[in-house]
Amino acid sequence: MQHILGIDVGASGIKGAVVDVANGRLQGERFRVPTPQPSTPKAMAGAFSEIVEFFNYKGPVGCGFPSIVKNGVSNSASNIDKSWIGTNIEKVFGEACGCPVFATNDADAAGVAEMRHGIGQGENGLVLLITIGTGLGSALFYKGELIPNTELGHLLWKHGKPAEAWCSSGARSHLKISRGEWADRFNEYLNHLELLFSPDLFILGGGESKFFEQYKHQLITQARVVPAKLLNNAGIIGAAAYAGERVRG
């Protein structure tokens, strides 16, 4: 199949679009629904199926999901309801929408999209994508190959709290700090990641990447730092690409 529905599940919103997986382009507008609160499997399955119904779609569905994902099962739940831990994402969403669902970590999906269809094309060194949203997601690539489920937003940081509590978009909103103050915090985080991994390239994705021009001068690292080319569509495109790969086997 060339056209596959990709759905990016986030802590604040769930958005989807039909994607031409050959060129990584959306086939029309996105459709978004708010993530239910509490974000239980049953409630989120209803929102997920609403997106599938909106596109009147039948076929494989790719799903980027905000947790560690192994064999379709959620192994963590930092920004969603804890009842997701141990729950089979593919089964719950698949039964709700009546389509086969293929789930992977949301940041890994965004990373795959950027490496194949975005700013990461042709990059053969160590590439680290950070998605900046409610939390911080990460995707690590070496010579174009994904090392899955890195979850570097959960690195213990200030006062024993995870890094995403310090410098995600969610933290910026919660703490009511300016984007300038946030950027200084985020640069500190990038420097720590550089100490650990020595990447050649940082790619910044998620909602905050749209404002890259406002804060790029505050990001001082040895590695290059660039905004994701696909911006906030990367998760959708990568999810669809992942489903396409699973279908092809």
Image (spheres, grey):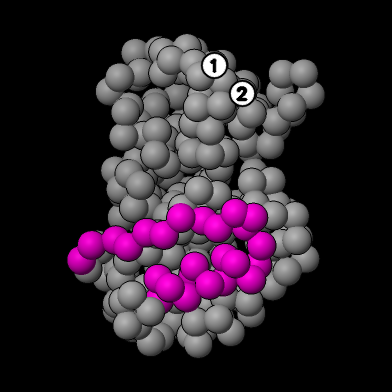
Relative depth, front residue between 7 and 46: 46
Residue visible at 37% across and 52% down in the picture? 234
Q: Tag 2 or tag 1, which sits nearer the N-term?
A: 2
**Residue 105 drawn above or below residue 131:** below
Question: Could you tell me residue 236's position as x and y percent?
Answer: 39, 60
Q: In terms of depth relative to the viewer, which is nearer, 241 or 46?
A: 46
Which region shows up in magenta? 28-52
In the rendered structure, the answer to whether residue 29 lies left or right of residue 155 reads left
| 247 or 174: nearer the viewer | 174
Q: Are marks 1 and 2 in contact (CB under 8 Å)?
A: yes
Q: CA distance from mark 1 to mark 2?
A: 7 Å
Placement of the N terminus among the 4 image quadrants: bottom left
In the rendered image, residue 135, in percent from the top left (x then y), is placed at 57, 38
Q: Which residue is mark 2?
A: 166
Asked if one can make out residue 121 in the rendered structure from this viewpoint, the answer is no
Q: Which corner quadrant of the image does residue 193 belong to?
A: top right
Instruction: Kindly identify the residue that appears in the image at 34 percent across and 13 percent down.
Output: 217
Q: Position of residue 244 (x, y in %)?
A: 42, 75
Q: Amino acid at mark 1?
A: Arg
Relative vertical location of residue 151 with respect to residue 249 in this rendering, above or below: above
Q: Is residue 33 magenta?
A: yes
Q: Residue 185: which disc?
A: 1
**Most foreground residue, 57 or 63:** 57
Residue 66 sits above or below residue 197 on the image = below
User: Residue at (39%, 39%) from the top-left corner?
Assistant: 207
The secondary element bearing badge 1 is classed as helix
Q: Secondary structure at mark 2?
A: helix
Does residue 245 show up magenta in the picture? no
Q: Is residue 169 visible?
A: yes
